[in-house]
Image: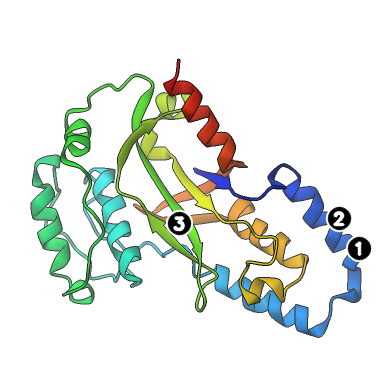
Amino acid sequence: MFSFNSNMSFATSFRSEAVNENRRMGSFTSAKESSALLTLRESLEEVFPICNSQAPLQTPFCFQYEITQGFLHNGVAASSDLIFPRRLDYGEYDRFWAHLRKFEVLLGKPFPPKTDKIVWGVLGQDIPLGSHAVVMSGSLQYQASGPLFKLRLKPLHIDLSHRLERRFSSDRFLEIDIPSIGGTKIPKCLSDAGFAGIAVVKECLIESHQDFIGCRTWVSFCNKAARERERMKRNSTTH
């Protein structure tokens, strides 16, 4: 499941504003905006990578996460020949990275930072962390060309958990920060789409599902202001 942390000041009224604006626009959308909406939709379809990983099914999910992270970091698609010879275990982290670097599309390319050894050790030994957990997170960042957003995944790290992570396991949740989609500092393809563009972005991020990271189906279940999340974390560390 996705948890989106938004920098939008109107996050709580995101749905109603977009829908009401579409109703006001009605059939008066200009040809320019219609073309921009089509371009925007096509752009958003390229944000989340298609799952092509052929890692053995019993391979721990954290390896699947790092495979996706490595390909996203270099802006290349995971090809169907991404095959690992056998099931990997937690003690083979360095071997896993060495094997990943050998794939043709990744030869000589920079890789994202590795997961801290302490964090990886927690995963391998299944150490209980109380109110904390090893979490997956990332961000969507605007691009000047290509897809509207570039998805960047952060290394696995220990952070404050929530009750659903503690109940169902933190590898079922991915927290993503998204930039403001209003105001003047937005890409041209989004501003050209007018108010209807907000609804298109919402449809892609909030209402659609994505199949990636371990070939799981991911859907959004929560959207809240980033500042609210940070305030909750600060409060938890002062008590």
Q: CA–CA distance between discs 2 and 1?
A: 6 Å
Q: Can you tell which quarter of the image residue 109 is in?
A: bottom left
Residue at the spot 86% in from the left edge and 55% down from the top edge: 20
Q: Secondary structure at mark 2?
A: helix
Q: CA–CA distance between discs 2 and 3?
A: 30 Å
Q: Secondary structure at mark 1?
A: helix
Q: Are circles 2 and 1 on residues that touch, CB within 8 Å?
A: yes
Front residue of this view, candidates 170 and 116: 116
Most extreme residue toward the top is: 239
- Seen in the picture, residue 32 relative to 98 is either above or below; the reply is below
Residue 100: x percent and y percent?
17, 63
Indicate left or right for 50 with 184 as reference. Answer: left
Type of amino acid under label 1: Arg
Indicate left or right for 87 with 64 as reference. Answer: left
Q: CA–CA distance between discs 1 and 3?
A: 34 Å
Residue 147: x percent and y percent?
51, 73
Residue at the spot 65% in from the left edge and 60% down from the top edge: 181
Q: Residue 211 got which mark? A: 3
Residue at the spot 51% in from the left edge and 50% down from the top edge: 177
Residue receiving disc 2: 20
Other-residue count near label 1 (Cα within 10 Å), few / some / many at <14 / 14–19 / ≥20: few
Q: Are circles 1 and 3 on residues that touch, CB within 8 Å?
A: no
Residue 27: x percent and y percent?
90, 73
Front position among marks 1 and 3: 1
Q: Can you tell which quarter of the image residue 169 is in?
A: top left
Residue receiving disc 1: 24
Residue 60: x percent and y percent?
23, 43
Whichever of labels 1 and 3 marks the residue nearer the N terminus, that label is: 1
Type of amino acid under label 3: Asp
